Structure formats: structure tokens, C-alpha cells
Amino acid sequence: MRSCVLAYSGGLDTSVILGWLLDQGYQVHCLYVDLGQPCEDREAILAKARRTGAESARIVDVRDELCRDFAFPVLAWRAKYESVYLLGTSIARPLIAKQCLQLAREVGARAFAHGATGKGNDQCRFQLAADALAPDVAVIAPWRLDAFRQQFPGRAEMIAYCESKQIPVKASVRKPYSSDENCLHISYEAGKLEDLTVNGVETVEFGMTVSPQQAPDQPESVSVGFESGVPVRVNGQALSPAAIVRELNAIGGRHGIGRIDMVENRFVGMKSRGVYEAPGMTILYEALLYIEQLTMDRDLLHLRDRLAPEVAEMVYYGYWYTAKMDALQAFIRTAQRHTTGEVQLQLYKGNILVDSRCSPVSLYDEGIATMEGGGSYNQTDAEGFLRIQGLPSRVQGRVTPRPY
């Protein structure tokens, strides 16, 4: 019998896909990858998979791995897709694929199945990860198959199929939008959000953050400590990667930090509208910025900033397991090796303000930077510096005078 591993959540889509794979004659191993989704009865989800007919069903907890090995390296780049999106869903997909492919190797499965649609970005991330990690394993994407879409043209048919198979699902025919959550963020899209005249922030029932208008009237201070560009402490307490994000989600969430509403360019070519909330990661991006300002050389910082949009595109498109990304990650580890220090922030009604920052390897020298008299900077040195810098302009100005 053909066997495959299914990235399984227990929701409507993967419940239907599990039944459909069984109908096609597959032996299915279900894997629930715990990324910090909302509290669910994990054992009940696995039991449902087994009752449906799965050969095996298991859970793997990768919350720390997601933060440490995927989100924090992206944080080190301060990479944002199209200057806004913090890539919370994008960076989780290569990890899901990795875990499913590891299970496929363990159980001898020759296929990896997922529930991503043929219109979205996730299919690209799963496919490209599988191509890089296990090119001999086939990828089954039912939503890209005409036969599957003909059998399930809408949610009503999917719900009816589950009823006929006695597969319990919590789903309704009508839903105002879809959401995807992990410990890094929650994304909201589709449904009513496809209408750009609809106010996304008012439509979505946010799960991590309060409205800035409803946030406390007094600011709250929070400190974040970094070592070599990696967050290691919150309010002076050393925490695991997932615990850092979880703590900052709670702190930032109660102050309305990290909400965005954007129209983005999907890898497949279309524009789509997404609403996101990522309180903890938003705080970390801001905190890292203030430490980098102290510790990172100017030209190195500017080079990193020029490369960061390209890194964001690679993550968004799904090129995580590539030689280019390996080289870029080696670069950022070197670039961040002195980014160590502590920053104190104030959170207030959706805003993040800096109180103080310090570093044992700070490049900021008050004696050089001071605008007061004295100090260790010799202003006379600027005369020769500017004569050299201005030489090309003076030569060109004599040859081709500009009107003014």
C-alpha cells in the first residue's frame, strides 16, 4: 500500500484530506506540528485521526525550535516582507515540512501531503522545502488537483463529506474570514477581508492584542536583553526562546502592540489582503534596532539593511533551504556577533518608545559625539576629509557646470 505523511491540524481541510487520501488507497501517517496554536485538546485531535483511519497520529512540539532556529535568525535581519509583514506564517512552513519529511523517512513513506491551496503562498513554501530536503519524496497537494476540487467545490461539500464519514469537525458553511495562529503571530485573511472597503481591524476578533484605544492609560516598561543578536532575557529574567516570545506577547498584547492591515503581493502573482498581529515579535524587532544602533558598524549596518528585503522575499517565497540562504545566514551571524546589550522600552497604546539602552561593546563614545566644547574629536580634521570627499564634485563642476 502507498503511504504518505499528512501535515494534520484536525480542522476541516485536513480532516477532509485525510479521508480523501484513504479513499485513494493511501496509508496515512498524521503529524500535528505544535507551533503554539491556541489551546486545543491535542489528544482528541490525534484520536480523531486514528478513528478516521490514519495508520498513526502523533504530535511534535517545535515551539522553541521555531523561535530559536527560524524566527530569531529572521529577526537578526530585521526582515519584513514589503516593509511591514514580520513573516510569522511564512517562517513556520519550512519547519512543518522538515518535521513531516523526517517522519516520512522514519516510517518509510514516499509522499508528503498538505492542505495548502493552489492560490496561496504556503504551497510554494511546502513544495520548495520538500524539493530541497527530500527530492525523492512526492508532494501531494489535493487542492491543486482537478478531481479533488470537483468533489469539494466549497465548504458545504466538505462538511457533508465529513458527516458521511462520521468525522467530527467544528465548521460552519459561512465564515467571515480564516485565521492561522502560532506562537509568533495570528494572520487573518479571506472572507469579508477580501472587500477592501471593510475595516479589517474592526472586522477581526483579535486573539493576542487589545485595541490600542482600550489599552491601559499608563505606559508599561519592559526590558529586553540580547547576546550576539539573539534575545535571551525579558525584564532581567533568562528565558527559553519560546518563553521570551510568549512573555512579550502577553505584555505587548495588553497594550495593543503589533497590529497591521496590508495588501501584499503573493509569490503566485496576485495581490491579497491580510490582517496580522504579532505583539512579541514587534517588540523584539524594535528592541534589536536600538542595540544595533550602539554596536553595529555603520557600513555593516547599512549593508545588512540593503540585504534584508531580499531575505524577507526569500522567506516569504519559501527559499529557506537554499545555498543562498545558508550564505546569508552565515553573514548575519558574523554581523550580529557584537550585538549584545539591554534596552528598556515603554509600551503605550500601540506605540513603542525607547527609555534607555546600553551595551558592554557599545561603539557610542560620548567624548567624540558631544556637541559641547572639548571632547576627543578634532574638528580641524574635517577640513581635509571634506576636501578629499569633494574632489570628484569639484572636477565635474568645472567640466560640466550645473545651472543654479
Image: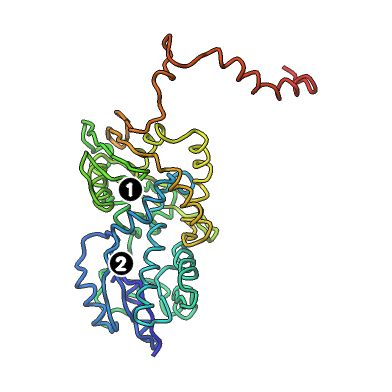
Which percent across, then down, holds residue 96? Answer: 37, 66
Q: Which residue is mark 2?
A: 33
Q: Quadrant of residue 27?
A: bottom left
Could you say which is closer to the camera, residue 293 or residue 154?
A: 293
Q: Residue at x 49, y 60 (%)?
A: 319
Query: Which amino acid is tagged 2?
Result: Val
Q: CA distance from mark 2 to mark 1?
A: 20 Å
Compared to residue 150, the image places residue 177 above or below, namely above
Q: Quadrant of the C terminus?
A: top right
Q: Secondary structure at mark 2?
A: strand
Q: Residue at x 28, y 59 (%)?
A: 63
Going from N to C along the chain, the mark reached first, 2 or 1, is: 2
Which percent across, then down, holds residue 54? Answer: 29, 82
Query: Which amino acid is tagged 1?
Result: Ala
Q: Which residue is mark 1?
A: 278
Please name the colour scheme applied to the rendered image.
Answer: rainbow
Q: Residue at x 41, y 16 (%)?
A: 370
Could you say which is closer to the camera, residue 193 or residue 20?
A: 20
Q: Quadrant of residue 383?
A: top right
Q: Secondary structure at mark 1?
A: loop
Q: Is residue 252 left or right of residue 368?
A: left
Q: Residue at x 21, y 61 (%)?
A: 39
Q: Residue extending furthest bottom? A: 1
